[in-house]
Amino acid sequence: MSNNTRHVVPDPNGGWDSKKGGAQRASKHFDTKKETEQYSRELSRKEGSELFIHGRDGQIQRKDSHGNDPFPPKG
């Protein structure tokens, strides 16, 4: 996990966590994925970071860029 990323990940003890890339501990824990996504999206926008939303299996389901895109579309 890169430092300029934010991740929505399942917590092994139940619920969902919002984590900054490279962090061992969660920034905040939630009971639902929806709450975690809303909180993480807001932080990601403030940080100008990339947001990764993981599924229960840990695989990335979606991602959103809220920072400087290194490959902006031409035109």
Image: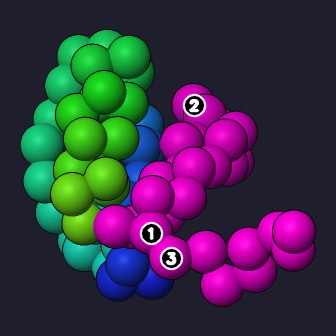
Residue type for callout 2: Arg
What range of the chain is rendered magenta? 48-75
Does the segment drawn in magenta span residue 25?
A: no
**Which mark is in front, 1 or 2?**
1
Question: Which residue lies most toward the front here?
Answer: 75
The answer to which of 19 and 70 lies nearer the viewer is 70
- Location of residue 64 in the rendering, given as x and y in whole percent from the top left corner: 57, 50
Q: Report if residue 18 is visible in the image.
A: no
Q: Residues within 10 Å of mark 1 (few under 14, many from 20)?
A: some
Q: Residues within 10 Å of mark 2 (few under 14, many from 20)?
A: some
Q: Report if residue 32 is visible in the image.
A: yes
As drawn, 58 above or below 11:
below
Q: Main structural element of the magenta stretch: helix, strand or loop?
A: loop
Does dot 3 land on a helix, a strand or a loop? loop
**Residue sitting at 75 percent across and 80 percent down?**
71
Q: Are marks 1 and 2 in contact (CB under 8 Å)?
A: no
Q: Which mark is residue 25?
A: none
- Location of residue 53 in the rendering, given as x and y in whole percent from the top left corner: 54, 42
The residues tagged by marks 3 and 1 sit, at their Cα atoms, a distance apart of 4 Å
The residues tagged by marks 1 and 2 sit, at their Cα atoms, a distance apart of 26 Å
Residue located beneath label 2 in the image = 56
Residue type for callout 3: Asn
Residue located beneath label 1 in the image = 67
As drawn, 24 above or below 13:
below
Give the image quarter of residue 38. top left
Residue type for callout 1: Gly
Give the image quarter of residue 67. bottom left
Give the image quarter of residue 48. bottom left
Residue located beneath label 3 in the image = 68
**Residue sitting at 19 percent across and 25 percent down?**
30
**Residue sitting at 35 percent across and 83 percent down?**
3
- Location of residue 23 in the rendering, given as x and y in whole percent from the top left corner: 25, 74
